[in-house]
Amino acid sequence: MKDANCIFCKLANGDIPTNTLYEDADFRVFMDASPATKGHALVVPKEHFADVYEIDADVLGKAVQVGQKVIKHVTPILGCDGYNLVQNNGEVAGQTVFHFHLHLIPRYKDMNNEGIISWIPNSVDAEELNALKESLKLD
Ligand code: AMP
Ligand code: ZN
């Protein structure tokens, strides 16, 4: 299904031009217009799914496989030293486009990496962590 009001439906399906790196029947991979680092690209399914909750499990699996294929190809070309695969769900998590997409973000040792995929680790009480795990675990 496509959503007529969704910009990524239009980009993924070629209704609006993109800087495309890779395309197959189900996905388009194109350059992010406001990249975190040089080579930042997005894996975008051609079908509309808002987020990880909605996306078909097989499409989700294929999105990661497409991401792997692309990063293996572009890593020696970019000369990057690592990669982040990032996928945001919900406004609070940084999602701004509500059509599922997987960020492929190359990482470079010789640049200022401050603010690129980082968080401040917190300490947690062992008992609290155990109780939380008990309440969350899947049978
Ligand atoms: P997120 O914040 O996870 O929803 O990511 C949305 C991403 O889409 C951001 O990194 C934007 O820079 C990128 N983006 C938004 N519009 C376009 C566009 N027209 N072409 C390419 N990238 C876009
Ligand atoms: Zn869409």
Image (cartoon, rainbow, N blue to C red):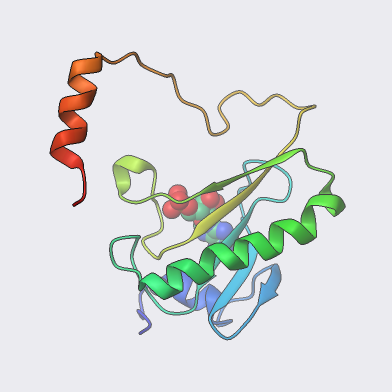
Residue 117 at x, y percent in the picture? 53, 34
**Foreground of the two, 98 or 104:** 104
Residue 21 at x, y percent in the picture? 72, 68
Q: Quadrant of residue 124?
A: top left
Q: Quadrant of residue 134?
A: top left
Q: Residue at x 36, y 61 (%)?
A: 98
Q: Quadrant of residue 93?
A: top left
Q: Is residue 28 visible?
A: yes
Q: Residue at x 44, y 67 (%)?
A: 60
Q: Is residue 7 visible?
A: no
Q: Is residue 40 above or below residue 31?
A: above
**Foreground of the two, 43 or 18:** 43
Judged left or right of residue 74, residue 33 is: left
Residue 112 at x, y percent in the picture? 70, 24
**Foreground of the two, 55 or 13:** 55
Judged left or right of residue 15, residue 99 is: left
* Quarter of the figure with the N terminus: bottom left
Judged left or right of residue 107, residue 134 is: left
Q: Is residue 15 above or below residue 126?
A: below
